Structures are given as C-alpha cells and as structure tokens.
Amino acid sequence: MGKNAAHAAIAAEDRLDFKKILPVFVIVLIDLLGLTIIIPLMPLYAASFGAGALTIGSLGAAYPIMQFVGAPLLGRLSDRYGRKPVLLISQLGTFIGFIVLGFSNALWLLFLARIVDGLSGANVSTAQAVITDSTTEKNRTQGLGLMGAAFGLGFVVGPIIAFLSLTLSGNDYRVPAFVAAGFSALSILLTWFWLEETLPVEQRGKAVASKAPLSLGAMFQALRRPEIGLLLALIFAQQIAFGGFEQLLALFTLNRMGLNASGNAVIFVFVGVLVVAVQGGFIGPFIRRLGARLLIYIGLATLAVGLVLTAFTPHQPMPSYSREKLAQELSASGEFRTHENPTTQHLKIELPPDTNNGWLGLGWILAAMIPVSIGGGILQPSINSLITKRIRRDEVGGILGISAAFLSGANAVAPLLGGAIFQTLGSTAPFLLGGLLMAALLLLSLYLIRPGQEQAASNNLAQSI
C-alpha cells in the first residue's frame, strides 16, 4: 500500500498543473491574436503604399531583427528582476507598435511600428520562462506545447478576425491594426491583475551576477556548450526552412493556384487547427512515451516530407478562379490611401491562366500541410524542452532568450533568403531546398543527439547542485 501511495504521489507530480499554466496560456493567446491579425495583412498594407517585393521582404524582416536584439536582453532581465515586469514591458511595446501601425500614413511608419514591437518582443521567451518555472522535467514539454497550442489557436482565430474586420470596414487596413491593439491592451490588463510572479526573489540574479551583459559573443559561447550548442543551431536551421515556408506560402499559392487573401486564410486556419491538435493534445502523451529526442527526429522527418510535397504542388487554380478578377483585386489600392500606385506594380508574381481549373492543386497543398504542421508543431517545444533539461534552473530565462534570438535571427534571414531564391530559381526551389535541409538535419541529429544523452546530462547536473 505504501509503495502504491508513493507511485501515486510521483504520478501526481508528473502531471501538468493546468491551474498554474492557464493564466500564461490565456495571456499568450490574446497577445498572439493581435500579432496573427496583423501578419496576413502586412504585405498588402505595405503594397498599398506602393512598396515593392524587396521592401515588403525587408518589412517582414524588421520585426525579427529587432527581436533578435531585444529578446535575449529582456530574457536576462527576467532572470534578474522577475518574469511579470518584463512581460508587461514587452506587451506595452507591442501595444504601442499596433497603435502606430493603425495611424500610419507613410511607409516609414510601418517600419517604425514593427521596429518598436520587435525591440520589446520578449513576450514569447518570458512566457516560456514562466512555464518552465511552473513545471517539472517530466511535464515541461507538455507545458511548452500548450504555449505552442496558443500559437495555433492564434493562427486560427487571428486571420478570421482580420478578414472580418476588413470586410466590415470596406478593406480599411487601419481597422485590423486597432483591433490588434485592443487585444494587446487586454493582455496587459490580464498580466497585471491575473498573472502571479513565478520566479522567487531569492532565485533572481544568480545566473547573471557573475556574467557579462549579453552579446553576440555570449550567443556564440552558448553555441559552443556541448550540452546545448547543437540544439540552438538546430532551432535556428529548422526555422530557416519553416519560417521561409510561412513567409512565402501566400506568394506560392498565388502563383500556383491563384489563391487570394480569403483562400490563403482557409489554409492558415487549417494549419492552425492541426498545430493545436499536435501541441495541445498529442505532444504530452508523445513526450512521455517517446522522449524529446525521438520527437525531434519525428519533427524533422515530417517537416522534410511536407516541404517537399508542397514544392511539387500542381499548377491548377480552383474552378471559380478568374485571372482578370484576381488581377483587379490585387491592383485595388483602397480609397483611404491618397497615392495611386497599384499593388501589383512591383510584386512580379505571375498569376496562373484561366485553363486547367480544378480541385487537385488545393487538395494537394492541404494534404502537404498535414506533415508540415506536425513537424512545425513538434520541433520547437521539443528542442526547447531538451535545452531546459540540460541547463541550470537559474539560467533558464537567459538561455531561452538566446533560443528566441536564434529563432528571430532565422525569421529575419528566411524572408530575404527565401524571396531571393523564389525570384531567381522559381517558386518550387525554396520549399524543395527547405525539405532537403530538414532531411540533412535529421541525419545529423541521428548521429549527434545520442540516446540517453539528455538523461546523463540531467544526472550530472543533479550531482553538481
């Protein structure tokens, strides 16, 4: 009976405490709603000011470049001063960025809005630190996976809200920006009144007291750490492929199938539903049965398959497609703008002809989205979970900040690199090369991430404390 009681107590400790996780889950979800409302609109918003493809790519890179600078610093500050104040600062920056976006009447203000939001963009890394503070090694991946589910829900609901607000406002791009600001303000209030600080005062500052301020040198130093260096490199490399996929998908479907914003919204919603299912429901049982290492293998394999399938999507628009109507839609600059530059003037994306219409193209890409979503949904929480199991508790915020910085760096490189490949080698090349990169990373990981390595590292850390 005593042994059964002990086993029951251990099982209870291994279960995720949803009461602790719920506040940060809701806060991250609402915060992400603001972001996901804006993401599908930014290329069109910039195009309404006459921006060309290169400028739109630069705008897409502005946020992650600034986040690359700001997130690691704010992550370290959360280790020193606590999670809640840093989260509030980052949310305030996001709110200001959306307000600037809504009042923009020139292209440079769009850049300013994304720069302000990016510099304060420690929302994700700080929320990861909150979850790490509130979980154990046994249930940490499930906790981080739930935050990934918030991303998935955001990508389901956000585009729907964006297009509803556009429809009701007559395609006034300012309205979604102000709606996003409203969600950001709500997340600030929830953080202030609902979220409890998870880093005790006595644990603050230990990891940074004897360390120099974060720099590129510190990031390269983290890469040289044998227990986490490969994982940090892996999270950067996989995001080059997946981030490029996210940034180029709309242009790809426009070129292959003539999908407009509404058609792409369907695909984003479909992907979001799959990510929610993977990260919110399946990753917990998977991590307990298979472990983070095997999940990384599975994530790389499925993402590789999905990207290659996407690359070979047939050139076939839907039966209702009209090239003339789509060209008119893309050329409409919107009555609320004073300039007269058509949005298609500099995009140089060839639209499919009004021939060979059918359902094969849409069906193919929806099928390809299944392995892409599974791989993308598995990889980040699994890699970050393995990272947190190989470091000390008092440096979790800083290392997750560095991890977020590598993600931001990849997100900055991906649209520029992917756009250049798309333009010079064609629409197939970015996705095919991304799939081949994932396959190469899988082989490398099978060789270098050895079975049981994370458990050995965990035992060594336990003995040293």
Image (cartoon, rainbow, N blue to C red):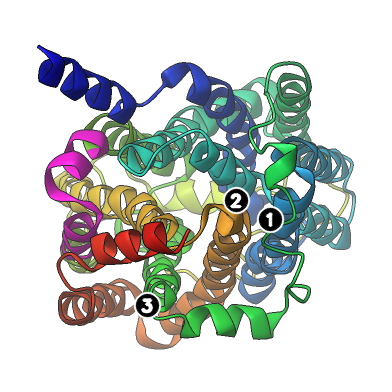
Instruction: Specify the quadrant of the image occupied by residue 232.
Output: bottom left
Neighbor class of circle 3 (other Cα within 10 Å; few <14, some 14-19, many 20+) is some
Task: Give whichever of discs 3 and 2 has the lower sequence position.
Answer: 2
Question: Where is residue 433 drawn, in percent x and y?
Answer: 29, 80
Q: Tell me the SS state at disc 2.
A: helix
Task: Give whichever of discs 2 and 1 has the lower sequence position.
Answer: 1
Q: Residue at x 26, y 29 (%)?
A: 281
Q: Amino acid at mark 2?
A: Ser
Residue 464 disc label: none
Q: Tell me the SS state at disc 3.
A: helix
Task: Identify the residue under disc 3.
Answer: 230
CA–CA distance in space, label 2 to label 1: 7 Å
Magenta segment main secondary structure:
helix
Marks 2 and 1 close (CB-CB < 8 Å): yes
Q: Residue at x 51, y 37 (%)?
A: 131
Magenta part of the protein: which range?
283-301
Q: Amino acid at mark 3?
A: Leu
Q: Tell me the SS state at disc 1.
A: helix
User: Is residue 196 shown above or below 1?
Assistant: below
Q: Is residue 293 magenta?
A: yes
Residue 75 disc label: 1
Q: Is residue 135 magenta?
A: no
Residue 125 disc label: 2
Determine if residue 331 is in view: no
Of residues 341 and 261, which is closer to you in this image?
A: 261
In this view, the residue farthest toward the front is 2
Q: Amino acid at mark 1?
A: Gly
